């Protein structure tokens, strides 16, 4: 009697093992492709952030889900009025959301320190274009809210920015911890995803 060696007593078993192996390999490939696409996208293009705290009221609330554009500032400098996510200069493991007020070359002054006759706590910018200074028209700040703090005596350097929270009475910002180095800017707040009723693109104000 002839004997066939290596005969599989269960013909269906190999097929099942091959199917499971193929599925796992496909799953691994999908996972690897996702990592190759998503990780660079989050590092270099856009990243989600959730607002924590009230320093940007009334324009951004605790729990707002935002998308931060990390790409734009690689090609063009930050603009006055941009809302940004930044690394806290005194502890770069912490992230803040603030608004850019002072640009390189600017001196930032808060009335009544500015010798303009304005006593109502407005923000003034002095630079080469406006040596006599101009008052920021901050329409995103509720009427009657004063911006108080210590004015700058020296112009900002070539890679330095001055940032404020929109909630001027309850914000830890450049008035307290000083200038923001450009290297600590994560990116521009581009889109609000949540809550749905406030979803939309974040616009930079025109002064």
Image (spheres, helix red, strand yellow):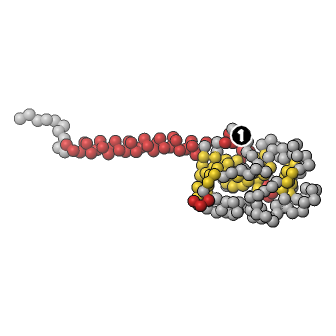
Q: How many marks?
A: 1
Question: Within the image, what quadrant is residue 77 found in?
Answer: top right
Q: Is residue 3 visible?
A: yes
Does residue 196 appear to the left or right of 169 in the view shown? left
- Percent coordinates x, y for residue 179 in the rendering: 79, 50
Does residue 203 appear to the left or right of 147 in the view shown? left
- The image shows residue 25, relative to residue 146, as above or below, that is above
Residue nearer the viewer, 196 or 70: 196
Q: Is residue 65 visible?
A: no
Residue at 60% across / 46% down in the picture?
A: 46
Residue at 60% across / 43% down in the picture?
A: 45
Circle 1 residues within 10 Å: few <14, some 14–19, many ≥20:
few
- Percent coordinates x, y for residue 14 in the rendering: 25, 42
- The image shows residue 176, relative to residue 133, as above or below, that is below
Residue at 17% across / 43% down in the picture?
A: 9
Residue at 63% across / 51% down in the picture?
A: 201
- The image shows residue 66, relative to residue 29, as above or below, that is below
**Residue wearing tag 1:** 76
SS label for mark 1: loop
> Looking at the rendering, in which quadrant would you find the N terminus?
top left
Residue nearer the viewer, 158 or 131: 131
Residue that extends furthest to the top in the rendered view of this protein: 2
- Percent coordinates x, y for residue 186 in the rendering: 67, 48
- Percent coordinates x, y for residue 67 in the rendering: 61, 51
Question: Within the image, what quadrant is residue 56 found in?
Answer: bottom right
Question: Within the image, what quadrant is residue 105 found in?
Answer: top right
């Amino acid at each position: 009697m002839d004997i066939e060696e290596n005969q599989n007593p269960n013909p269906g078993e190999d097929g099942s093992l091959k199917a499971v192996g193929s599925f796992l390999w496909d799953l691994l490939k999908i996972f690897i492709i996702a990592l190759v696409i998503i990780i660079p996208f989050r590092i270099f293009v856009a990243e989600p952030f959730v607002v924590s705290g009230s320093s940007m009221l009334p324009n951004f609330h605790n729990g707002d889900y935002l998308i931060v554009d990390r790409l734009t500032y690689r090609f063009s400098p930050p603009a006055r009025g941009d809302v940004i996510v930044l690394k806290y200069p005194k502890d770069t493991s912490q992230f803040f959301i603030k608004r850019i007020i002072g640009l390189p070359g600017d001196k930032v002054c808060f009335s009544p320190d500015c010798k303009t006759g304005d006593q109502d706590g407005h923000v003034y910018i002095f630079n080469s274009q406006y040596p006599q200074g101009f008052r920021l028209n901050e329409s995103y700040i509720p009427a009657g809210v004063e911006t108080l703090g210590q004015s700058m005596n020296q112009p900002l350097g070539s890679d330095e920015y001055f940032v404020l929270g929109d909630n001027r009475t309850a914000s830890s910002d450049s008035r307290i911890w000083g200038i923001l180095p450009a290297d600590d800017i994560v990116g521009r707040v581009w889109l609000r995803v949540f809550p749905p009723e406030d979803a939309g693109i974040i616009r930079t104000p025109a002064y």
